[in-house]
Image (cartoon, rainbow, N blue to C red):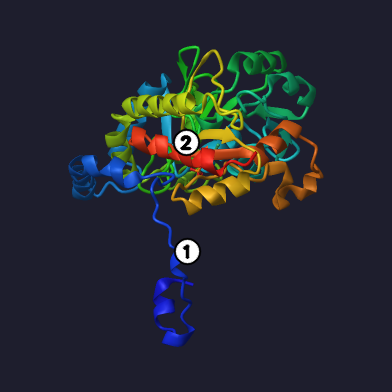
């Protein structure tokens, strides 16, 4: 029920909250307002340029952002699309993934990773994650590979890249393309190479809360492959190879000009913002180092983490989350139910116990507030509150 409908209720029937239930938020999980405030002059100028030229769907601002984002990701091409989900789906379609095919991925991701596979008519085949890095366990990929396997999607979860050398080695052996789900990993690196530059395609989400966030929905595919680029270019625009000439059945998955203009402004700050996230993560690590009830994130030896999310593991996670919220610290859970246990995938008949690490982590993950503008005193308050809220 929205507020306006509440206002129309007679005085006596309007629900009243007891005053003790009103909690002042001391540290929000995410604060986009503090990120945008210093950029407002530049953002307003960017809006003005887009409105002056009426370049709202696709167009020069999207083309400019694509060039800038490709350079940032160390790839030859980047293609703006409507969302991260579009990026994954169109990449798989362009690779020819279809009904009867299988795509290997992990169950501890946002639903969209598996959804994109299903939207192609293919079947997601899950492998468990590594208990240290929470990314795809390469040791399980070979056993999951069949004659039907048409792609592998490692997910660079929380801002840390998967063990790409090991995954690419298996993929090469079987001739399987690797599509990186880099939706949480803008600017993350593996052996000095950027997320999105190691697979045949890299898929990014610019959902507002991401390390690089738009003012609405947007996404991108990065690739070095000119053929893949051309296919996705056609697919994202109703299958049009030329205006009103449709060579294939596509979709409307174009990026908005306004989103591209916003993203260009924010891309210039991304490296510095990621560095600030790493500094914040270091302070969390330092303050939590002597707390045995908390498992801190582990950074893989070849990785530069982008810390989209700073997730710790605790027992009685739901209780801790509630007690912290009652003290004004908002945390989150990424993600409470692994994909194979979602009702939507019940048809795969993968019950509890199928992927033990992913399932245990899903019960224990607690995402602490994380954004570049988080102040040291806020981090200290989060850690003090967390320690108070842990039960032995
Ligand atoms: C790992 C992962 N994959 C895919 C997506 C889908 O991106 P979008 O929400 O832009 O469609 C997200 C977004 O939350 C994500 O975190």
The residue beneath circle 2 is 383
**Left or right, residue 255 beside residue 137:** left
Image quarter where the C terminus lies is top right
At x 41%, y 47%, the residue is: 28
The residue beneath circle 1 is 21
Check the image and report above or below for 79 versus 27. above
Residue 145 lies in quadrant:
top right
For disc 2, the neighbor class at 10 Å (few under 14, some 14 to 19, many from 20) is many
Q: Nearer the viewer, residue 364 or 204?
A: 364
At x 56%, y 31%, the residue is: 157
For disc 1, the neighbor class at 10 Å (few under 14, some 14 to 19, many from 20) is few
Q: Determine the secondary structure under disc 2.
A: helix
Q: Position of residue 17 (x, y in %)?
A: 46, 71
At x 43%, y 37%, the residue is: 370
Q: Nearer the viewer, residue 35 or 366?
A: 366
Q: Position of residue 258 (x, y in %)?
A: 30, 46
Q: Position of residue 362 (x, y in %)?
A: 66, 40
């Amino acid at each position: 029920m929205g507020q306006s409908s509440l206002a129309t209720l007679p005085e006596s029937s309007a629900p009243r909250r007891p005053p003790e239930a009103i909690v002042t938020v001391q540290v929000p999980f995410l604060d986009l307002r503090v990120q945008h405030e210093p950029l407002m002059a530049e953002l307003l100028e960017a809006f003005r340029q887009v409105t002056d030229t009426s370049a709202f769907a696709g167009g020069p601002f999207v083309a400019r952002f694509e060039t800038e984002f490709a350079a940032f990701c160390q790839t030859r091409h980047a293609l703006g699309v409507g969302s991260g989900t579009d990026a994954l789906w169109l990449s798989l379609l362009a690779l020819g993934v279809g009904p009867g095919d299988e795509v290997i991925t992990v169950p501890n991701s946002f639903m969209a990773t598996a959804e994109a596979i299903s939207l192609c008519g293919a079947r997601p085949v899950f492998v468990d994650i590594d208990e240290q890095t929470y990314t795809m366990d390469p040791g399980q990929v070979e056993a999951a590979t069949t004659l039907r396997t048409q792609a592998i999607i490692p997910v660079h979860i929380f801002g840390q890249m998967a063990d790409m050398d090991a995954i690419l080695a298996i993929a090469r052996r079987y001739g399987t393309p690797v599509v990186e789900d880099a939706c949480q990993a803008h600017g993350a690196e593996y052996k000095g190479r950027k997320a999105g530059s190691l697979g045949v395609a890299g898929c990014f989400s610019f959902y507002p809360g991401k390390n690089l966030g738009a003012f609405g929905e947007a996404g991108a595919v990065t690739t070095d492959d000119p053929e893949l680029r051309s296919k996705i270019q056609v697919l994202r625009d109703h299958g049009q190879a030329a205006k009103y000439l449709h060579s294939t059945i596509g979709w409307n998955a174009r990026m908005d000009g306004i989103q591209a203009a916003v993203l260009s402004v924010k891309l210039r700050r991304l490296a510095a913002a990621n560095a600030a996230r790493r500094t914040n993560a270091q302070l969390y690590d330092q303050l939590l180092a002597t707390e045995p009830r908390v498992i801190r994130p582990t950074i893989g030896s070849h990785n530069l983490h982008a810390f989209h999310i700073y997730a710790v593991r605790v027992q009685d996670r739901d209780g801790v989350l509630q007690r912290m919220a009652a003290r004004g610290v908002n945390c989150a859970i990424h993600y409470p139910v692994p994909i194979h246990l979602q009702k939507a995938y019940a048809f795969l008949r993968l019950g509890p116990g199928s992927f033990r690490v992913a399932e245990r982590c899903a019960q224990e993950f607690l995402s602490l507030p994380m954004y570049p503008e988080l102040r040291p005193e806020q981090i200290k308050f989060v850690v003090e509150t967390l320690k108070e809220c842990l039960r032995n």
